[in-house]
Image (tube, rainbow, N blue to C red):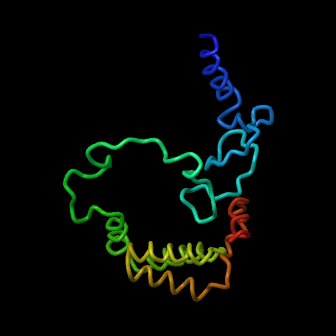
Amino acid sequence: KMLLGRLFSYPDAHRYRIGANYKQLPVNAPVAPVHSYSKDGAMRYTKVSDPVYAPNSKGGPHADVAKYGQPAGWHTDGDMVRTAYTLREDDNDWSQAATMVREVLDDDQRARLVDNIVGHLLNGVSEPVLERAFDYWHNVDKELGDRIEAGVRAKQEEKDPKAADQGNPARSSMQRKA
């Protein structure tokens, strides 16, 4: 029982005293490299250069089903999903954003939105990611997607002038990798 108590209390004390990143201290660090999407937090010791979203196109961490098998889970008479009991016509990922673009924003605001998105897509974004971004914005609004794609294609050799001021090392290392 003492061992079981210590298995809980020691890591709990570390989290309380040192913070969530206590396993990054050299004395606490695992011997094998840990691949996770954990990026920020108190007392972060190692810099993160990998993208912090999943799935990603930069070869980030993923489940190795060949080595470890399928992730644990169970199945009932049907799939367990969160969904509306009765689906409505506007139950999708795009209708609210489309309504905002078409009915809430005026022409000047839409132009600023396009300029902002185009500026962010100028920072060394690879072609497969660009295609997904264009597809995303076409789903929101066809005209908006066309304007964004035309803006990026017209300025493809440029860089966002604000990119240097952002000072995000993870972002700049990803730009070099892209």
Provide residue 127's location: percent of width, then percent of height: 59, 78
| Residue at 71% across, 30% down | 18
Provide residue 105's location: percent of width, then percent of height: 38, 73
**Left or right position of 33 against 91:** right
Position above or below: 100 against 19: below
| Residue at 75% across, 32% down | 28
Position above or below: 18 against 127: above
Front-most of 79 and 57? Answer: 79
Q: Quadrant of the N terminus?
A: top right
Residue that extends furthest to the left in the rendered view of this protein: 86
Front-most of 117 and 174? Answer: 174
**Left or right position of 125 against 87:** right
Quarter of image, res 31 = top right
Residue that extends furthest to the bottom in the rendered view of this protein: 154
Q: Quadrant of the C terminus?
A: bottom right
Quarter of image, res 19 = top right
Provide residue 140's location: percent of width, then percent of height: 38, 72
| Residue at 66% across, 23% down | 13
Front-most of 158 and 46? Answer: 46
Provide residue 133's location: percent of width, then percent of height: 50, 73
Residue that extends furthest to the right in the rendered view of this protein: 26
**Left or right position of 23 against 53:** right
Count of numbered labels shown in the rendering: 0
**Left or right position of 121 against 79:** right
Front-most of 99 and 109? Answer: 99
